[in-house]
Amino acid sequence: MATSTETTHRYPRPAAEVLSALVDERYLRARLAALGGPGAELVEHAPSPDGGARVVLRQGIPGDRLPSFVRSLVPGDLVIERTERWEPTASGAGATIDAKVPGTPGSIDCSVRLADSGDGCVATVTLVAKVPVPFVGGKVEKVIVDQVGRLLAAEHAFTVDWLTSGAR
């Protein structure tokens, strides 16, 4: 079983500029410091010549912010290891994102498509959470989708601020 969702976010800059920020090491470190939670770390940053990058992030969600049935499965803080592969495309940019919680059977697969639109761009994010655990897997998937949705919304707001504040 899997639980999926799709969301869109609008950015006030063209896709190429948003991509440039999303793969910038200073931006990634600042975003992790602001939103990464306990133990947040930029594990790997490998830019590619075409303007894309492979990025590995470690993020944490405090255990006290998780529902009790999730805390019974994963005691302590929840650690998420996230690998992002970004590349420019003819219409903007795209990414595949894989996330795992070490020591658990769950996974998160995500794709992001940035497409120029007017004077900015639109990001379409498709997320699929899979937790193959009998009886509670579907409930855990819904929590994952909810938590990742909140994180993506916070990251979007951070990115818009980064793009418009001149923090670059």
Image (cartoon, helix red, strand yellow):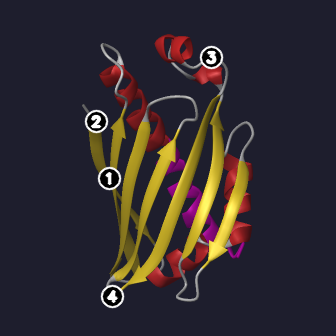
Query: Would residue 163 be counted in the magenta stretch?
Result: yes
Q: Which residue is mark 1?
A: 7
Viewport quadrant of the N terminus: top left
User: Which residue is disc 2 drawn over?
Assistant: 3
The residue type indicated by label 4 comes to: Ala
For the residues labelled 2 and 4, the Cα–Cα distance comes to: 30 Å
Label 3 crowd bin: few (<14), some (14–19), many (20+), radius 10 Å: few
Q: Residue, x 52% and y 16% (percent of image)?
A: 73
Q: Earlier in the sequence, mark 4 or mark 1?
A: 1
Tell me which corner region of the image, top left, top right, bottom left or bottom right, holds residue 119. bottom left
When asked about the image quadrant of residue 89, the answer is bottom left
Q: State the image quarter where residue 95 is shown.
A: bottom left
Q: What residue would you read off at disc 4? A: 90
- Gap in angstroms between the C-alphas marked 3 and 2: 23 Å
The residue identified by callout 3 is: 75
- In the image, residue 65 lies at what x, y percent? 59, 23
Q: Secondary structure at mark 1?
A: strand
Asked whether the beta carbons under mark 1 and mark 2 sit within 8 Å of each other, the answer is no
